[in-house]
Image (cartoon, helix red, strand yellow):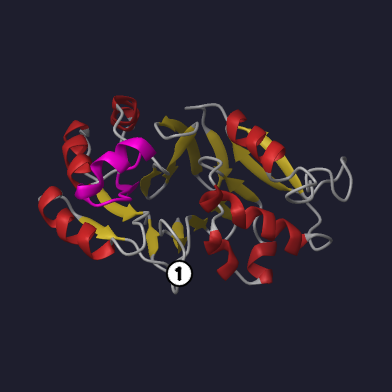
């Protein structure tokens, strides 16, 4: 299983794209501005999209991709998300005011997008020995992450999250956890903003990781533009003893 990082920044700018992961060329996990780097041919290969929450930096690419693919694909793209996230998409984006409702176009029987509600911790078969498990996380809106079990190991992506024992309880129940993609949005000096917006700082993540019984390689994501160097310096202290990398657009994660 191969995961390509289309976007992993907490904002936009030259060379920066917001969160989107491409799994085995056919599945998106989140659909931020990173989707815009896919060619039209690559977009036509997408069969499923799994969303972590409704914030614009994680969903805006879905709107543009749907517009690109109108009349170009024969089968609907299935969009998996929680009930709250799907409701927000229908009410606030695909509502004929902000954007066309591609769940009814070209008609309701054969739409371009088909909504599919996920249940937390209920396994979804992706085929080819791959299974995805949604799990609840703590953020400012209802949000979840995804654990993907494959023949080569287990990868988990938290999406946007904050300190919450339920996260570690779920991850600790997994039989194995080889790779964990988790966010750090702000440097330590922004701890108050981190708490209000429900994002990690290096120090807080370092403390919370003590609750994890597994020892996965960490893939750090969602740094706010302009804070990257400071976050990297603070991680050298806060995450001492952990194997980790700061993700960049275009990186790949493989489960062999």
* Percent x, y of residue 57: 52, 52
Q: Above or below — where is 249 with respect to 23?
A: below
Whether residue 165 is in magenta: the answer is no
Q: Relative to 5, is 25 on the left or the right? A: right
What is the span of residues highlighted in magenta in the rendered image? 178-199
For the C terminus, the quadrant is bottom left
Residue 94 visible to the viewer: yes
Q: Which quadrant of the view contains residue 89?
A: top right
The residue pinned by badge 1 equals 13
Whether residue 183 is in magenta: the answer is yes
Residue 30 visible to the viewer: no
Q: Above or below — where is 120 with respect to 250?
A: above
* Percent x, y of residue 244: 22, 56
For the N terminus, the quadrant is bottom left
Q: Above or below — where is 105 with respect to 116?
A: below
Q: Relative to 136, is 99 on the left or the right? A: right
Give the residue drawn at x 48%, y 35%. 143
* Percent x, y of residue 139: 42, 35
Q: Relative to 2, is 195 on the left or the right? A: left
Mark 1 residue element: loop
* Percent x, y of residue 63: 68, 54
Q: How many numbered discs, if any?
A: 1
Q: Residues within 10 Å of mark 1 (few under 14, many from 20)?
A: few
Q: Which quadrant of the view contains residue 227?
A: bottom left
């Amino acid at each position: 299983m191969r995961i390509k990082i289309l976007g992993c920044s907490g904002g936009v700018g030259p060379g920066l794209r917001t969160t989107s992961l491409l799994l085995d060329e056919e599945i998106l996990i989140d659909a931020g501005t990173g989707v815009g780097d896919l060619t039209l041919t690559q977009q036509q290969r997408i069969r499923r999209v799994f969303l972590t929450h409704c914030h614009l930096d994680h969903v805006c690419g879905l709107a543009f991709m749907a517009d690109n693919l109108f009349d170009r694909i024969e089968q609907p793209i299935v969009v998996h998300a929680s009930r709250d996230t799907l409701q927000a998409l229908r009410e606030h984006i695909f509502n004929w005011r902000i954007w066309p409702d591609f769940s009814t176009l070209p008609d309701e029987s054969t739409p371009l997008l088909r909504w599919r509600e996920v249940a937390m911790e209920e396994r979804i078969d992706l085929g080819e020995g791959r299974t995805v498990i949604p799990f609840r996380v703590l953020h400012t809106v209802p949000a979840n992450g995804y654990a993907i079990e494959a023949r080569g190991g287990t990868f988990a992506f938290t999406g946007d999250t904050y300190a919450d024992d339920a996260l570690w309880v779920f991850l600790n129940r997994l039989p194995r956890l080889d790779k964990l993609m988790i966010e750090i949005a702000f440097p330590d000096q922004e701890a108050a903003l981190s708490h209000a917006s429900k994002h990690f700082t290096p120090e807080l993540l370092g403390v919370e990781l003590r609750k994890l019984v597994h020892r996965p390689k960490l893939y750090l994501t969602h740094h706010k533009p302009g804070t990257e160097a400071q976050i990297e310096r603070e991680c050298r202290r806060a995450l001492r003893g952990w194997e980790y990398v700061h993700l960049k657009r275009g990186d790949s994660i493989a489960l062999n």
